[in-house]
Image (spheres, rainbow, N blue to C red):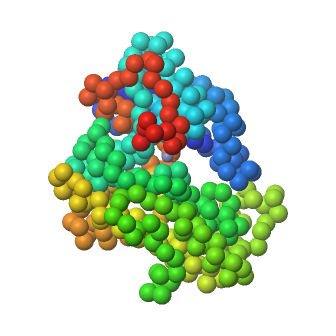
């Protein structure tokens, strides 16, 4: 089945075509530069960009794959969680197309699709422990197969990516600062002492949920005591240049790099503490661990889970960089899997905003 995937849950507009052999073609347009001007994603602007770009990107996709519209046999669209306006643009586009072509459609959980993306690159053994760490979510799952997910724990406030972005912002790095913070941390040293600078928030309990807001507070207090570590703010017109930020990071004091390493290690270790605890909740012991979402690109998180998997005898799987951040390939892949298992949606399926209790 040739399946079209559509992603528009936040600030990336993506379309991809997948069949039994894998990815046929994909297109992606990021709005990151637009939102960087405002220090975060502006929902109304994001929806307008999706509405403007989707028809243009769709034509580009057909051209790239050298197919006609009528060749598409199924449609998958991210219908949550995300920004409601942005999701609705993608969902409306997908439904119109499904109606016009008279083909099946399925609403896909964006978070599940992040985890299923490894299926495009690896043979996955189930059950799998799924750890989804993104800008808006920190979720632990028992994955029975790519179309059956059981939520075991989630963040009660800030997500791991948000915790990275907020510390980066405190240091005068631009939004979203997670990757730059990682770069800074990689220059740092992880000694026994600085591994303990920051707390492992919300771990002294017996549940599987996360709360990273305490870590943000600890970082703010740390910078209050060490104000000399905050990087010098840049004039507004310099904000868009990645090269300038790379230079700023390269010239950062060692003490700051050490603090970034300590902060990222605290996040990675907190994730590992809860992941370890989750193993007791599996019906059958997991065979693999899937790490996905933007923060799965973080070097500290990857290293911590590589060790975790060795200790626990789990196969460690994570998508390649390209499939880590938001993309339409993962939507098309999970949607195609669902459609092949008879899981299609009626044309009346809704879009679910982030935080909706009906969707996780
Ligand atoms: O999954 P994603 O692309 O978008 C959603 O949130 O759905 O994740 C984006 C998040 C941002 O918070 C970004 O700063 C973070 O992932 N991120 C990183 C790294 N690369 C991206 N955080 C830490 N280290 C990285 N290398
Ligand atoms: Zn995402």
- Name the residue nearer the viewer: 228 or 49: 228
In this picture, is 238 found above or below 32? below
Find the residue positioned furthest to the left: 284
Q: Position of residue 255 (x, y in %)?
A: 61, 84
Q: Position of residue 329 (x, y in %)?
A: 43, 39
Residue at point 22%, 49% (across, down): 126
Residue at point 52%, 41% (across, down): 354
**Horizontal side of residue 5 vs 50, given as left or right:** left
**Horizontal side of residue 246 vs 306, given as left or right:** right
- Name the residue nearer the viewer: 124 or 210: 210
Q: In which quarter of the image is residue 17?
A: top left
Q: Locate the N terminus by quadrant.
A: top left
- Name the residue nearer the viewer: 294 or 198: 198
Q: In which quarter of the image is residue 308?
A: bottom left
In this picture, is 121 found above or below 242? above
Count every numbered label the image shows and give the total.
0
Q: Where is residue 306 in the image (x, y as percent from the top left)?
A: 33, 67
Q: Where is residue 216 in the image (x, y as percent from the top left)?
A: 58, 67
Residue at point 49%, 20% (across, down): 95
Q: Can residue 315 be seen in this view?
A: no
Residue at point 18%, 56% (across, down): 285
Find the residue positioned furthest to the front: 205
Q: Is residue 314 visible?
A: yes
Q: Locate the C terminus by quadrant.
A: top left
């Amino acid at each position: 089945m040739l399946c079209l995937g559509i992603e528009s849950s936040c600030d990336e507009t993506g379309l991809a075509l997948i069949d039994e052999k894998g990815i046929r073609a994909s297109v992606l347009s990021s709005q990151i530069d637009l939102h960087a001007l405002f220090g975060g994603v502006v929902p109304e602007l994001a929806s307008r960009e999706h509405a403007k770009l989707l028809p243009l990107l769709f034509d580009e996709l057909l051209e790239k794959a050298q197919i006609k519209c009528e060749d598409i046999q199924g449609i998958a669209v991210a219908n949550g969680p995300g920004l409601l306006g942005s999701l609705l643009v993608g969902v409306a586009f997908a439904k119109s197309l499904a109606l016009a072509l008279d083909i099946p459609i399925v609403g896909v959980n964006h978070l599940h699709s992040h985890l299923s993306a490894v299926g495009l690159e690896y043979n996955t053994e189930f059950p799998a422990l799924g750890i989804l760490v993104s800008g808006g979510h920190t979720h632990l799952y028992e994955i029975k197969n790519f179309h059956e997910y059981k939520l075991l724990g989630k963040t009660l406030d800030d997500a791991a990516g948000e915790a990275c972005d907020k510390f980066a912002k405190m240091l005068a790095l631009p939004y979203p600062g997670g990757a730059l913070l990682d770069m800074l941390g990689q220059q740092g040293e992880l000694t026994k002492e600085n591994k303990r600078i920051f707390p492992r928030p919300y771990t002294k309990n017996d549940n599987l949920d996360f709360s990273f807001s305490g870590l943000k507070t600890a970082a703010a207090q740390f910078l209050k005591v060490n104000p000399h570590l905050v990087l010098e703010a840049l004039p507004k017109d310099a904000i868009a240049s990645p090269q300038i930020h790379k230079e700023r990071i390269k010239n950062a004091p060692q003490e700051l790099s050490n603090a970034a390493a300590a902060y990222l290690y605290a996040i990675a270790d907190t994730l590992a503490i809860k992941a370890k605890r989750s193993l007791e909740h599996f019906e059958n012991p997991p065979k693999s661990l899937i790490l996905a979402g933007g923060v799965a690109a973080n070097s500290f998180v990857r290293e911590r889970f590589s060790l975790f998997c060795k200790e626990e005898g789990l196969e460690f799987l994570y998508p390649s960089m390209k499939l880590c951040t938001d993309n339409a390939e993962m939507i098309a892949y999970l949607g195609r899997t669902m459609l092949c298992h008879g899981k299609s949606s009626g044309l009346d399926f809704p879009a679910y905003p982030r935080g909706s209790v009906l969707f996780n």
